[in-house]
Image: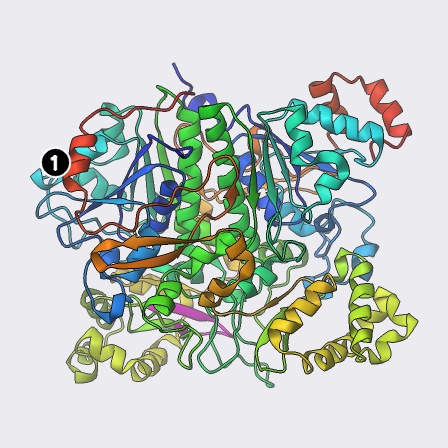
Amino acid sequence: MLPTAADGAMALEGLRILDFTRLGFGAQATLICGCLGAEVIRVESTRHPDAIRVMPPFVPDPGAKGEGFGAATLANAAGAASANRGGIFYKYNTGGKRSITVDARHPKGLALLKDLVAVSDVVTESFAAGTFARWGLGYDVLQQIKPEIIYVSMCGFGHSGPDVSHVTMGPTAQALTGLTFMVGLPGRPPAGWSFSYLDHVGGYLGAVAILTGLLHRRRTGEGQHLDVSQLEPATALSGALLLDAMLNKRPSRRADYPTGNRRLHPPAAPGGAYRAAGEDRWVVISCRTDDQWHGLVAAIGRPDWTTDPRFSSLEARLAHADALDELLETWTSSRDRYEVMHALQAAGVPAGAVQDAADRLERDPQLAARGHYTALGNAEVGPLPLEGVPFRMSATAPHTGGILHRGPPLLGEDTTAVLGELLGITADEVEALATEGVLS
Amino acid sequence: MSGPLDGIRVLELTDGTVDYCGRLLAGLGADVVLAEPAEGSPSRAVGPFLDDIPGVDRSLAFWADNVGKRSVVVGGDDADSGDGADSGDGADSGDGADSGDAGLLALVAGSDVFIHTLRPADAARRGLSFEALSARLPHLIVCAVTPFGQDGPWADYLADDLVLMALGGSMAGCGYGPGPDGRYDTPPLACQEDQALRTAATYAAIAVLAAVAWRGEGGTGQLIDVSAHECSASMTEWHLMTYLCSGEIYRRGPHPTLTGADGRQIAALTPDFLGPHVFTRMLEMLEADDVAGPLSDPAFADPGHRARNYGDVWRALKRLAEKHPAEELYRLGQKAGLPWGVIRAPEEVLDDHHLAARGHFVALPHPELDRTVTYPGAPFVAHGSPWVMQRRPPLLGEHTAEVASEWARPTTQPPR
C-alpha cells in the first residue's frame, strides 16, 4: 500500500541534494526540489557569504521599516551586519533547505565535502565554469567518489562553448536571447523586464535537469553531468518568432514590432491595458471572439457599438483598434480596475487588473484561497509570506517549507546537525573543526 | 539512445495554451500523443503560417511547441478540446459524456500521463474527472493546467496570457518610465509570446516528472493541479520581497542600457554588490579606451563615493559606448568580467556561435514540404541522456491508426 496524501508523503522524499548554488538561478532549481520533498543541503561560506544573503532590500526587525531596493549599494550592503537579512534570499531559499558552512579551501573541509558527496544523490552548483573543478570537485572527482552521482551545473553560458567565460545575470541572458527585445512599443527602444525572469526560467529547467538525472539513474543506474545554461532555456520562449523569421523572412526587428500589449497571433480587439481610475492604475481586457465582444458591449452598456460598422467583426475591430481602444478607455478610466475586471468576467470577457506586489499579497482572494503564500521564518527573521511551487499534487502535496516544514535557513545553522546525521561526527568534533577554521 | 521517459505515454488534450509542456516531455523521451478534434487542436489555427498561407499543418505557432509529438484525431461532434484559457465558460459544451469521447477514453486508458486544460465541470461532464479516471486507472497521472486552478473564487474566470501577466505582477513592473511631469503616458507592458503560459507549461512538466518519479513501477498516479495565475505570480524575483522589506512598490522605468555607435543597445549591468573587482576591472577597460575621466581618481575605489557620484561612472560608460558598435561593446564588457549583453531580436540567436557550438539548434526534415526546418533544441546539455528530437511536429491525425494499435497494449512502466 503506497502512502496517500494523509501520510504526508512527498514526491522526492529520500533524494539528497548537496547544493552549492548561489544567487537566484541555481537556487530556484533546488527550491523546487525542496518543496517536492528532496533534502536540500546548502553548502555555504562564512567568509564569502552568498551575495543574495547580504544584498538589500533587508528584512527589517518586526515593526521596523527597512531600506528599499532603490538604495541598493555596496555601502548599504556592508552596513548589514547579518548574513540573514537579504530579502531576496527568502524568495529563493524556501523548500526546507538546510545550511552548513564548510571551507572548501581547507584540506579538511574539502575532505568533509567529499564525504558528503558520497552520501548524496545530486550535487548542484552555479559558479562560473571551472570554479568548482578548481576547488577539487570537478565531475571527474565526484564520479570517483560516487559513480552514480548526478551533477547539475547551472551557469550563465554553461560549461562548454567559445564564450564559456562570459558572465551573466538574468538581464544579460534576457538581452542576448531576445526576451528584452520582446517587451516594448513599436518605434521605441526595448523596454525589457525589471526583474530576472531568466533566473526563474533557468531554475525551472535546472529542476527538470535534476529530475532527468534522477529518472535516468533509476533506469540505468548511471549518473551524469547535466550542464544547464541560462541561454538554452530561453530560446523556446520566443515561440514562433524564430520560425517566422527563418521561413517567412519576417524578422522581428522591424518598424512595427514588438506591438506593445497587442498580440498578433491570435489577435484580440479590444486587446491591451486600459487606464482605470486612480494614479497609474490599469486593467487588461482581451476579446478574441464575437461572444466575448457581445459580452463586453452588454456589460458596459454600449449595445450601439455592435451596430457600428467599424466594429462589426473581429477583422473590422482589428482594423479600427485605435478608435476602439480610445472609446473603451473612456469607460474604464473612471472605474476601479477590479470593478472593471469583475464586471467583464461576469459577462464572459477575459479581463484582469494590473496587479503589483502589494496587490498580489493583499487584494488577490484567489492567491489567498489557493494558499499561495506560507508564513515561514527562522530564528532571526519572523514569519514572512513566502512562495514555493505554484501547483498542487493530490498524493504528494508539495510544501513551501519542504519536508521539514521550515523557513529559509540561517547561515550555517545546520552544520552540527548535518555533519552529525550524515557523517557521524560528534558535536565535540564539530567544535574542534570549527576552531581549526574548517567550518568557515 | 532512449531518454529518461522512454516508455512513458503522455496524452495531451489541450486548448493550445500549454503545448510546450508536452514538447519538454517528448524531449526527455516520452511518447507524447496529442488528441485532436477533426478540425485540429486550437493551436493549429494560430498564426503565423508557413508562407502566410493558413492551414492545419502550416501553423508555425503549432510547430514551435509540438516538436516530437504524434497526432491522433479522436471522436465526433463533442471531441473539442474543451474551454481552457479563453474560449468561454462551457459555451461550446456538448451534453453528457457522449460517444464522441469513447475514442478519447480508450487513449486515456492506455496512457501513463494525461495532460488537459479542462475546467472541473467540463472534465466531469466528459467522464474525465480525476475521480472517475483514477477509479479505473489507479496508475494514471492527470495534470490539469487551468488559468486559476481547480478551485477558489476566480476558478471560473477567463484568462489569456495578457490577463495572466497583468494579474501575476510581471506587467506592473515592465514598461517605460514616466514623463517629466511624473505621469505615465504609456501602459505597463507584457512580454510577447505567452510567457505566463510558458511558465505554467514548464511547471506542469516539472510536476509530471516528479509524479512519474514517485509512482515508479506499479505505483499510483495522482492529480496535478496547475494554476497559471500562481505560476505567473511567482516569477517576479525581487518585487514581492522588496515590498515586504520596505513597503515600497517598484514603479516601472528605464534599466541600465548603453547605446553603441551603431544605434543598437546593450544591457549594461555594473553589479557592484558582487565585489570590488567589478569596479577595478571596469576601470581598466575604460582607461584602456581613454574614457575613464574622473574615475581614475582613487576616491572612486570607495563604493560609497561611487554611489554618490554615479553620474560620473555612467558618463564614462557612455563615452565608451559611443566608440563601439553594440556587439563589440558587449564583448568588451564581458572581457572585463561585466555581465553585459547585447539586446538581440529573438531570431538573432540563430547566429550565436556559442549556442551553435553547444549543438543547440536541430534541423528536422518536413518531407511532405520537401524542406528542412531548424528548431531550438535541448534546454540543457545532458551528457548521459541526450535530448530526444527526431520527429517534426505532427500532421493532423498523422498517427491515428498506429497509436490506436500500439496503445491498445497496456502501458509498461519503467523499473524503479
Q: How dense is the environment of label 1, judged by Cα within 10 Å: few (below 14), some, or many (20 and up)?
A: some
Work out whether residue A117 or residue A353 is closer to the camera in this orientation and state it: A117
> Residue reaching furthest top?
A1
Location of residue A60 in the rendering, given as x and y in whole percent from the top left corner: 73, 51
On the image, which quarter does residue A271 sit in? bottom left
Residue under the image location 72 percent in, 66 percent down: B270
Residue under the image location 63 percent in, 26 percent down: A120
Numbered range of the magenta stretch = A273-285
Left or right for B18, reference B177: left
Residue B329 showing in the rendered view: yes
Instruction: Say which element carries label 1.
Output: helix
| In magenta segment, residue B374 | no
Q: Is residue A302 above or below residue A427?
A: below
Residue under the image location 84 percent in, 80 percent down: B293
To which residue does mark 1 refer?
B102
Location of residue A132 in the rendering, given as x and y in whole percent from the top left corner: 71, 41
Left or right for A6, reference B68: right
Work out whether residue A279 or residue A153 is closer to the camera in this orientation and state it: A153
